């Protein structure tokens, strides 16, 4: 199947209210253009360097760019005013640096708090016991606006995935019922190529799909 075929199939399966982010890491601009021409407008990258290259060289300008990988503090300066949504607010130190640099430039960082729901050492994201402190700090960071939550769940079977997604939705709903400055629960970014259907069933309204759009990744370039 072509990229266009993949996009058509995904669009038929994914409800309109769910944002489909095409995760284009390691993929060439031509593949992204094919996805764009098939109707996609949201693209996600893991690395700042690759994101900036693609922003500068992608021929279509009416797209939204998502940084979905870990953001190093020394790379913030490259994305100020350029990225639509940072999915990976994963520490208070990163929050403080985002606030400092975005305030200096008079810009607003739109972010999702990344929760390490499976408490995996190999993944970034805050643990649940750190969430309240993160929310308090976000309230005091006027140049950082929290738009929701993101998680990369542990690999597992459908029952395990569903349980993690349910847990994330419960956290999302709990925060949404409370009143905060600078924090709104608009986006729940859960689900990738292998589990996006289950994620949507459990309340995700933003899915990050790479292989399902572009085919297998190429890492040897």
Image (cartoon, rainbow, N blue to C red):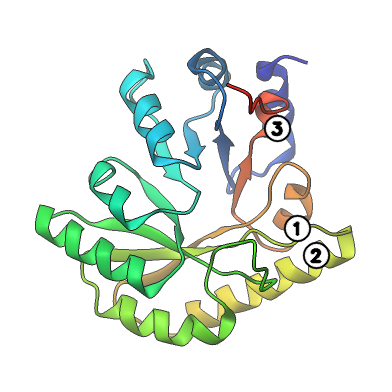
Position in image of residue 43 (x %, y %): 49, 34
The vertical placement of 81 against 148, above or below, is above
* Residue 155 location, quadrant: bottom right
Q: Earlier in the sequence, mark 1 or mark 3?
A: 1
Q: Is residue 69 or residue 178 the one in the foreground?
A: 69
Graded by Cα atoms within 10 Å as few (under 14), some (14 to 19) or many (20 or more), the crowding at tag 2 reads: some
Q: Nearer the viewer, residue 193 or 154?
A: 154
Of helix, strand and loop, which one carries label 1? helix
Answer with mark 1 or mark 2, whichever residue precedes in sequence.
2
Up/down of 38 relative to 153, above or below = above
Query: Which of the 4 quarters of the picture holds residue 94?
Result: bottom left
Q: Nearer the viewer, residue 53 or 112?
A: 53
Secondary structure beneath label 3: helix
Image quadrant in which the N terminus is located: top right
Quarter location, residue 178: bottom left
Q: CA distance from mark 1 to mark 3?
A: 20 Å
Who comes first in sequence, dot 2 or dot 3?
A: 2
Taking the spot 27% from the left edge, 70% from the top edge, the residue there is 96
The residue wearing badge 1 is 201
Q: Are marks 1 and 2 in contact (CB under 8 Å)?
A: yes
The numbered mark at residue 211 is 3
**Is 111 left, or right, of 22 in this rendering?**
left
Question: In this rendering, is residue 122 above or below 175?
Answer: above
Where does the image place residue 105, in percent across and percent down from the top left?
A: 11, 53
Q: Position of residue 206 (x, y in %)?
A: 57, 51
Q: Callout 3: few (<14), some (14-19), or many (20+) C-alpha neighbours within 10 Å?
A: some
Query: Which label number is shown at residue 162?
Result: 2
Q: Is residue 177 visible?
A: no
- Name the residue rendered at 64%, 77% in the picture: 170
**Distance Cα–Cα, label 1 vs label 2:** 9 Å
Residue occupying image coordinates x 47% and y 31% = 41
Task: Write the residue at 70% across / 71% down.
Answer: 118
């Amino acid at each position: 199947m072509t990229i266009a075929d993949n996009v058509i199939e995904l669009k038929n399966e994914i409800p309109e209210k769910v944002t489909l982010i095409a995760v284009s890491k390691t993929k060439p601009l031509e593949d992204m253009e094919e996805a764009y021409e098939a109707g996609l407008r949201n693209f996600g990258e893991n690395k700042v360097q690759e994101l900036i290259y693609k922003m500068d060289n992608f021929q279509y300008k009416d797209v939204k760019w998502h940084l979905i990988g870990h953001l190093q503090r020394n790379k913030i300066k490259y994305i100020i005013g350029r990225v639509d949504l940072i999915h990976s607010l994963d520490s208070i130190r990163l929050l403080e640096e985002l606030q400092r640099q975005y305030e200096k430039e008079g810009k607003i960082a739109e972010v999702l708090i990344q929760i390490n729901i499976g408490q995996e050492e190999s993944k970034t994201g805050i643990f649940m016991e750190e969430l309240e402190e993160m929310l308090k700090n976000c309230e005091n960071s006027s140049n950082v606006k929290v738009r929701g939550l993101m998680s990369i769940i542990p690999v597992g079977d459908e029952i395990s995935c569903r349980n993690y997604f349910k847990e994330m939705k419960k956290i999302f709903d709990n925060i949404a019922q409370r009143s905060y400055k600078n924090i709104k629960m608009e986006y729940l970014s859960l689900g990738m190529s292998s589990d996006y259907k289950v994620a949507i069933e459990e309340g995700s309204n933003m899915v990050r799909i790479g292989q399902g759009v572009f085919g297998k990744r190429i890492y040897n370039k």
